[in-house]
Image (cartoon, coloured by chain):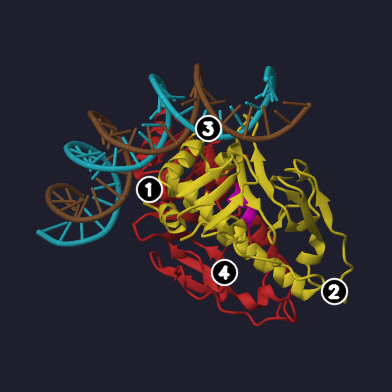
Chain colours: A yellow, B red, C cyan, D brown
Amino acid sequence: MYITLDHPGCDAILPQPSSKYTRKINELTLEPDTNLFRQGDPASQVFQVKSGALRLSRYFEDGRRQVISFSFPGDVIGYPFEGEYSASCRALTPCRLQPYRMQQLISPDGEDPALHAGFVKAAMREIAAMHDHFVLLGQKSAVERLAAFLTALASRIGEPVGQYTQFKLPMCRADIADYLGLSTETVSRAFSQLRREKVIALDGILTVVILDLDTLHRMAEAA
Amino acid sequence: MYITLDHPGCDAILPQPSSKYTRKINELTLEPDTNLFRQGDPASQVFQVKSGALRLSRYFEDGRRQVISFSFPGDVIGYPFEGEYSASCRALTPCRLQPYRMQQLISPDGEDPALHAGFVKAAMREIAAMHDHFVLLGQKSAVERLAAFLTALASRIGEPVGQYTQFKLPMCRADIADYLGLSTETVSRAFSQLRREKVIALDGILTVVILDLDTLHRMAEAA
DNA sequence: CGTCTATTTGAGAGATATCAACTCTCGTGG
DNA sequence: CCACGAGAGTTGATATCTCTCAAATAGACG
């Protein structure tokens, strides 16, 4: 069982609206550290990530926060609930997004059926991915969680460099901690352990080099 | 922020198929401790619970298990992913279910648009409910988790008895533990604590009486 | 080069898991 | 109707893991 972030290995879930049915709505760009939407905002659009990385999270009065997911190209974000967004979404890097009107996705009449089916499939994919994350949060140890997280990132944004896979983390340790249900210190210690065991190497704080993907996979699995 | 199980306060999300579009598919009944489907089964149908309670869970080689959700009347279960069910679903009580062919829900052409829209809304609701559960698993203490769980059950299947709310748990402690990401012993201790503090009372093992719903709510929130 | 912030590391406290023993329920059969 | 027994639940003692608080280090930026 692999942990998935949002929509692993998934590109272009939503087909472009066919001109027959919908006018093209302009692509949207977002600067780092700007919000796409906030918890409670009225939701009339969903978005598909074209490029960049975003963070979806919920905040609480007492300062606690849960990071729900990180989104990468191909992912769909902004699923509404009762007309509102149930979490806040912020760009971690420069982003390009394709917005879709909720209306055109929910009620198929007179709209593009392929687009519609694509949206449903994306939602199903989202649900399955969240099931994986339940397992991570409910059953796994700190190192297992980080290993699962890095495994997912590797398959999502990893690039081969020589015999290794590497990628640049778009999020800080605190984001990772709140995503994995750990403290930043525990995340840091887990990083250190993976480094000590030569499973990964760090280049600076943000660049991760996977030295032994098989072992990382194995460590990601339940004990 | 309240924790929700699946679809709180939600009855009959999916409208009955209009005869204009689809033939009525026969309702389905399930005995306790029988599976509706298993992880990996090919998925051609989704189901809406008409009566009873079910458990959705994932199993692992090493014996660990994560209970993904409990489903009650009004809930939709069996969201497929890549043509398969990603978890196993088992009846905890006698159940009645309304099956729907996936095909009629995914591609709207020539099918019932209202049914289709209902399915999309149910999926959105599911996604929002899972966000709540992430918060529970990622941020809450044992007692907070149990309080949140009981709060959700109270609003879902609770019945007023005098000035109190009461309900019969359809699942055992181990199910609750695997749902909340705790051990059965910790769940048991949390029950005992709530009892000691006169927030709940137990009648036998399975019947829960909520003595102080406000306090239970408060305890369910993050510290 | 210095400052500010994020990250890492260390030490100790706290929460939950684990292992073991005991108790309670509830179904079964006398 | 009551007694019995198996399984589920509870409780206790201890181990383990993660959190918290504090200090040191490293990296980013002016």
Disc number for residue A110: 2
Q: Gap in Å between the C-alphas at discs 4 and 1?
A: 28 Å
Of mark 3 and mark 1, the one earlier in the sequence is 1
Asked whether the residues under the numbered discs 3 and 1 touch, taking CB atoms below 8 Å apart as contact, a structural biologist would say: no
Q: Gap in Å between the C-alphas at discs 1 and 2?
A: 50 Å
Disc number for residue B219: 3
Q: Which residue is mark 4?
A: B80
Residue depicted at x 57% and y 40%: A178
Q: Is residue A132 left or right of residue A172?
A: left
Q: Is residue A120 above or below residue C20?
A: below
Q: From this viewpoint, is residue B14 visible? A: no
Question: Mark 1 belongs to which amino acid?
Answer: Arg
Dot 3, crowdedness within 10 Å: few (<14), some or many (≥20)?
Answer: many
Q: Quadrant of residue B32?
A: bottom left
Q: Which residue is mark 1?
A: B173
Q: Is residue B13 magenta?
A: no
Of mark 4 and mark 3, the one earlier in the sequence is 4
Residue C8 in the image: state x and y as whole percent.
50, 33
Closer to the eye: label 4 or 3: 4
Q: Secondary structure at mark 3?
A: helix
In the image, the segment drawn in magenta is B126-131
Asked whether the residues under the numbered discs 3 and 2 touch, taking CB atoms below 8 Å apart as contact, a structural biologist would say: no
Dot 1, crowdedness within 10 Å: few (<14), some or many (≥20)?
Answer: some
Residue A212 in the image: state x and y as whole percent.
45, 55
Q: From this viewpoint, is residue B149 visible? A: yes
